[in-house]
Amino acid sequence: MTIQNDSSYSQSGARTISAADLRSTIRGRVILPDKAGYDQARALFYGGFDRRPSAILRVADAADVARVVSLARETGSELAVRSGGHSVAGHSVSDGGLVLDLSDMRGLEFDLEQHTAWAETGLTAGEYTTAADAHGLVTGFGDTGSVGIGGLTLGGGVGYLVRKHGLTIDHLLTADIVTADGKLRRMDEDNEPDLFWAIRGGGGNFGVVTRFQFRLHQLNSAFGGLLILPATPEVIAGFMAEADAAPDELSTIANVMTAPPMPFLPKELHGKLVVMAMLVYAGAPESGERVIAPFRALATPIADMVHPMRYPEVYPPEPEGYHPVAASRTMFVDSIDRSVAEMILEYLQASTGFIAVAQLRVLGGAMARVPVEATAFAHRNSRIMVNVAALYERPEEKTTHESWATKFAASLQQGDDGAYVNFLGNEGEERVRAAYPGGTWDRLRAIKAQYDPTNLFLLNQNIPPVGQ
Ligand SMILES: Cc1cc2nc3c(=O)[nH]c(=O)nc-3n(C[C@H](O)[C@H](O)[C@H](O)COP(=O)(O)OP(=O)(O)OC[C@H]3O[C@@H](n4cnc5c(N)ncnc54)[C@H](O)[C@@H]3O)c2cc1C
């Protein structure tokens, strides 16, 4: 779509609209290429996506969302949908099309008797978590505060409560969505049940979700923090075994990675491999102390910042303007023993990225107790999620790091060839299918055909409607 300063006209399919008309279409803000703030508004968390949308529409409410969806449909413009801007594949910014940006829609209402919350999708995980904690309540999101609840929830949501309370979608009670026809629909287990099934894992394929209603859990205290251990095969394998054996209250993320120059790490370790693990025990600190003791005993910790905490401390402040470029792969594996740990260390050592990381998340617990077919997230029985990544600065190094990531991921394969959709990059249709194994893919395609037959919502890990 072309945006003109004054008049508007139609021209052989490529529609032009005036800026004034665009402004009068929505109550929210219109950010055009010549405006201050445009470059910031089109930037995503990850660098390397230099795309220039014709307009960024910061919608104010569901009616605005419906108008933008209709505008995109009627004009044939490519439509990107953005909540927190953390798309690993860069899907939330379009080149030449429209960006529907929900970041001004941050309403949040708690029902403290029912322990539920209505949350608009422009909120970040950190904002929601801090507000809920003021009432001693929590809903589980991911490991990073700035990630949007929009994208994270629609893919599933794996975080520090995954073993205790399940995925983020396992807290989801109701959602409001604007579908491709511009209609606002409410869905839950009884209303539009197929659509409700599909959005719990199917990503942004089915419409623009404006609000989620989540269940909250009481959590007055927690115990956790960073535990930094030497990166040896014994420590890595031992950590995985302990994390698997631990009670559901404990969820962990072990990052085997190049140590960044952080003040609490001895200078001689900067740039060397360490196990930087985050442990979160969702329960009383005294019990947490006992459960975490075996991790502390794996080796003399390089740093031990595990302490009684409020849950929002899982989201420390993040650096401004940090836009790393990453070559990454995601997968599930069954076990990480000493020999797998050795291989992980060898690959990380060989990377020429300024940071190389293998992120290991032991799953199970509440997530695995939900039947596989209950939602479009179909990896409930997978044991461990692994994300490998090399962060780099110079675009010309892309091939080197991508090839390293491909080989690393292939070497780690143990037979579970599934993928978590939210960590997929631009890896082709086969990997999108890997996110939706078995009958999940066919059911999603049928639901897509019902709600988005022309594939208006294409800029995502795309599920083509049946017939396309
Ligand atoms: C640093 C980092 C840490 C992460 N940690 C975790 C983690 O611990 N656990 C985890 O599960 N995931 C994690 N992720 C992955 C994250 O869940 C996905 O990248 C997710 O898509 C980001 O959501 P967003 O709203 O910020 O992204 P956006 O870039 O705004 O959106 C991504 C895509 O989601 C869809 N979308 C977003 N909002 C809506 C909406 N309201 N309606 C319809 N479609 C929408 C669109 O297709 C869009 O292209 C992490 C990502 C990063 C970059």
Image (tube, rainbow, N blue to C red):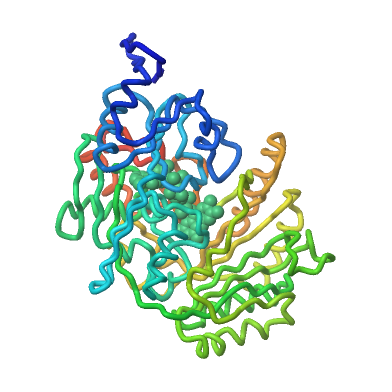
Looking at the picture, tell me which residue is in the foreground, 54 or 401: 54
x and y, in percent, of residue 71 in the image: 29, 27
Looking at the rendered structure, the number of numbered marks drawn on it comes to: 0
Residue at image position (52%, 85%) is 288
Quadrant where the image shows the N terminus: top left
Inspect this view and state whether residue 415 appears: no
Whether residue 25 sits left or right of residue 295 in the image: it is: left
Is residue 256 among the parts visible in the rendering?
yes
Q: Residue at x 58, y 84 (%)?
A: 292
Give above or below for 33 relative to 437: above
Q: Position of residue 135 (x, y in %)?
A: 36, 73
Q: Quadrant of residue 378?
A: bottom left
Frontmost residue, 353 versus 47:
47
Task: In the rendered view, tell whether residue 146 sits above or below residue 22.
Answer: below
Q: Residue at x 47, y 86 (%)?
A: 284
Residue projecting furthest to the right:
268
Q: Position of residue 210 (x, y in %)?
A: 30, 47
Q: Position of residue 25 (x, y in %)?
A: 28, 28
The quadrant holding residue 14 is top left
Q: Point out the image quarter for the C terminus.
A: top left
Question: What residue appears at the point 60 percent right and 54 percent down from the top-left corner?
Answer: 409
Looking at the picture, tell me which residue is in the foreground, 324 or 411: 324
Residue with the most extreme left position: 190
Q: Is residue 447 above or below residue 383?
A: above
